[in-house]
């Protein structure tokens, strides 16, 4: 099945504490990984400022190696170090010719479009996820699939994963389907350290008729 990304704004929200830090980035062109023809946008998460330097350098190295220096970054940072993180990351991004915009808008399901990506924090996001899936289904009049991916090998990126697909039936019922699949290093360039990061991604597939999919990726740090 061929696929294509629609130009869309990306809104990333961190709700790991009471303060929300969000980034709003306009996607200019899709980015392709070397091991696939499907275009992806590249993102990563920095949840813990204590490990900032080591974590960022390791992530940058992995992203640069996997993506031939063509990178769009989405960075989520805790509120307490927002100012310091912004300047540090902005300098780092400028050296890599990457544009970063940071702000603090709140997330609303109405802002979602094909190609939108939303980061949500910990397990309290389940309610928000359901609302986003329901809204996306109604807005695009389509079936929405949601996947949760776990198990990270930080040395090579993602190793293996389990996923859960939530399908919105015509009656509006969400059914949970459990399955397995493998991911290779670079398939999804998002790392998390000691925090839970959740992503809802609405993807546009081009087949006999246009189908919008929402993928919910949950990332857990290894204990």
Image (cartoon, rainbow, N blue to C red):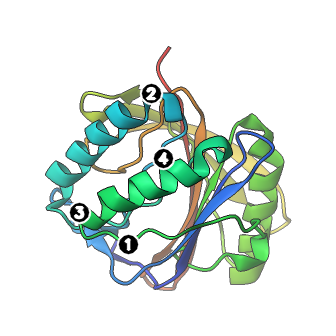
Sequence-wise, the earlier of marks 2 and 1 is 1
Residue tagged 3: 95
| Residue shown at the point (66%, 42%) measured from the top left | 80
Sequence-wise, the earlier of marks 4 and 2 is 4
Between the residue at mark 2 and the residue at mark 1, the CA separation in whole angstroms equals 30 Å
Residue tagged 2: 151
Q: Residue furthest top?
A: 223
Between the residue at mark 3 and the residue at mark 2, the CA separation in whole angstroms equals 32 Å
| Residue shown at the point (40%, 54%) measured from the top left | 89
Q: Is residue 205 above or below residue 46?
A: below
User: Which label lies toward us, 4 or 1?
Assistant: 1
Residue tagged 4: 45
Q: Kindly state the secondary structure of the residue where label 3 is placed.
A: helix
Sequence-wise, the earlier of marks 4 and 3 is 4
Q: Is residue 31 above or below residue 43?
A: below
Between the residue at mark 4 and the residue at mark 1, the CA separation in whole angstroms equals 16 Å
Is label 3 in contact with label 2 (beta carbons under 8 Å)?
no
User: Is 105 or 80 nearer to us in this picture?
Assistant: 80
């Amino acid at each position: 099945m061929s696929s294509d990304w629609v130009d869309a704004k990306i809104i990333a929200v961190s709700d790991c504490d009471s303060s929300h830090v969000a980034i709003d980035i306009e996607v200019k062109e899709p980015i392709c990984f070397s091991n696939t023809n499907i275009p992806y946008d590249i993102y990563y998460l920095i949840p813990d400022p204590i490990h900032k330097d080591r974590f960022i350098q390791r992530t940058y190295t992995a992203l640069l190696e996997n993506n031939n220096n063509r990178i769009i970054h989405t960075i989520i940072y805790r509120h307490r170090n927002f100012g310091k993180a912004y300047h540090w990351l902005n300098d780092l991004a400028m050296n890599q010719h990457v544009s970063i915009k940071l702000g603090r808008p709140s997330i609303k399901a109405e802002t979602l479009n094909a190609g939108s990506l939303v980061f949500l924090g910990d397990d309290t996001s389940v309610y928000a996820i359901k609302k986003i899936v329901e809204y996306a289904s109604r807005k695009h009049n389509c079936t929405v699939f949601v996947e949760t991916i776990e198990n990270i090998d930080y040395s090579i990126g993602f190793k293996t994963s389990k996923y859960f697909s939530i399908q919105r039936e015509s009656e509006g019922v969400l059914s949970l389907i459990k399955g397995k699949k493998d991911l290779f290093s670079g398939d999804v360039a998002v790392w998390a350290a000691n925090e839970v990061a959740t992503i809802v991604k609405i993807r546009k597939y081009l087949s006999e008729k246009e189908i919008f999919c929402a993928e919910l990726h949950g990332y857990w740090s290894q204990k």
